[in-house]
Image (cartoon, helix red, strand yellow):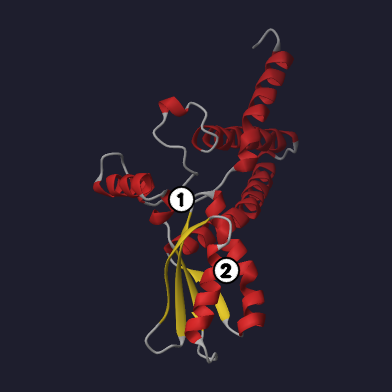
């Protein structure tokens, strides 16, 4: 390290940069029972449902339909349920019915993937993208809700806020260091080191828990929580 400082710096910087590459695929997700400790009742129930029925049965989506303005509430709900059934990523329709007052319809959609899977989030977005077409065809408003959709929405908000938050924190730290050390080189060097080490940490998390590296040594390959 002392005899060849330039080489040591290059090796460390390049190594951290390479380790940080997987961080671009970082996905955030709220924890569910699949993240519970192995052997706990919640985890056992989650694993049994996923094994014998499918992972999507642990993460049903609720599609609500405002049918108060339609003269055929049952037909509208059935038509939308039929459209949902043909969508990629839908395992089954668990329930499709208007409520007792015929002002709201509920369709339970069982996805083919778990609640924290990227394909489930894609399915939620696709259903929402079809809402204008159903509005035009049937004159009803369609929304996707439920615990799974709510968790996806929160995760998306966190993902969107992550970069601006990081920029603010890093920017303020640079300004603070510049004031303290009255230098530009020292704050910039410290900030670059911080960014590289943080990126490498996130990269390691993604590589292990999302990409499945060292899977034999881990009990799960779930998104970061």
Residue 70 image offset from top left, x and y in percent: 54, 90
Residue 104 seen by the camera: yes
Residue at 71% x, 40% y: name it: 182
In the rendered image, the quadrant that contains the N terminus is top right
**Distance from the alpha carbon under mark 1 to that under mark 2:** 21 Å
What is the total number of numbered labels drawn onto the structure image?
Answer: 2
In this rendering, is residue 97 above or below 52? below
- Answer left or right for 179 relative to 115: right
Q: Splitting the image into 4 quarters, where does residue 220 fall?
A: top left
Q: Earlier in the sequence, mark 1 or mark 2?
A: 2
Q: Which residue is mark 2?
A: 83
Dot in front, 1 or 2: 2
Along the line of sight, which residue is nearer the eye, 35 or 95?
95
Which residue is at a point 46% across and 47% down the rendered structure image? 225
Asked whether the viewer can see residue 143, the reply is no
What x and y, as percent, mark residue 8?
A: 68, 15
Q: Secondary structure at mark 1?
A: loop
Neighbor class of circle 1 (other Cα within 10 Å; few <14, some 14-19, many 20+) is many
Q: Are marks 1 and 2 in contact (CB under 8 Å)?
A: no
User: From the viewer's perspective, is 110 left or right of 197?
Assistant: left
Whole-percent x, y for residue 92 in the image: 46, 60
Pick out the residue farthest to the top.
3
- Residue 45 numbered mark, or none: none
The residue to which callout 1 is attached is 114
Element at label 2: helix
Of residues 112 and 194, which is closer to you in this image? 112
Residue 179 vertical placement versus 203 (above, below): below
Give 113 or 203, whichever is nearer the viewer: 113
């Amino acid at each position: 390290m002392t005899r060849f400082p330039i080489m040591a710096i290059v090796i460390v910087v390049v190594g951290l940069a390479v380790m940080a590459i997987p961080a671009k695929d970082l996905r955030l997700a709220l924890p569910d029972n699949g993240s519970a400790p192995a052997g706990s009742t919640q985890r056992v129930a989650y694993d049994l449902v996923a094994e014998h029925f499918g992972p999507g049965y642990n993460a049903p989506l609720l599609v609500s339909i405002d049918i108060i303005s339609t003269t055929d509430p049952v037909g509208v709900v059935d038509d939308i349920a039929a459209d949902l059934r043909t969508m990629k990523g839908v395992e089954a329709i668990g329930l499709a019915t208007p409520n007792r007052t015929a002002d709201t319809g509920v369709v339970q959609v069982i996805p083919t993937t778990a609640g924290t899977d990227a394909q489930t989030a894609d399915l939620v977005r696709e259903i929402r993208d079809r809402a204008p077409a159903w509005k035009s065809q049937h004159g009803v408003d369609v929304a996707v809700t439920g615990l799974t959709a709510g968790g996806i929405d929160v995760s998306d908000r966190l993902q969107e806020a992550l970069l601006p938050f990081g920029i603010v924190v890093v920017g303020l730290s640079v300004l603070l260091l510049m004031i303290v050390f009255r230098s530009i080189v020292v704050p910039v060097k410290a900030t670059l080191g911080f960014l590289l080490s943080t990126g490498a940490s996130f990269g390691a998390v993604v590589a292990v828990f999302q990409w499945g590296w060292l899977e034999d040594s881990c009990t799960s390959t779930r998104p970061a929580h």
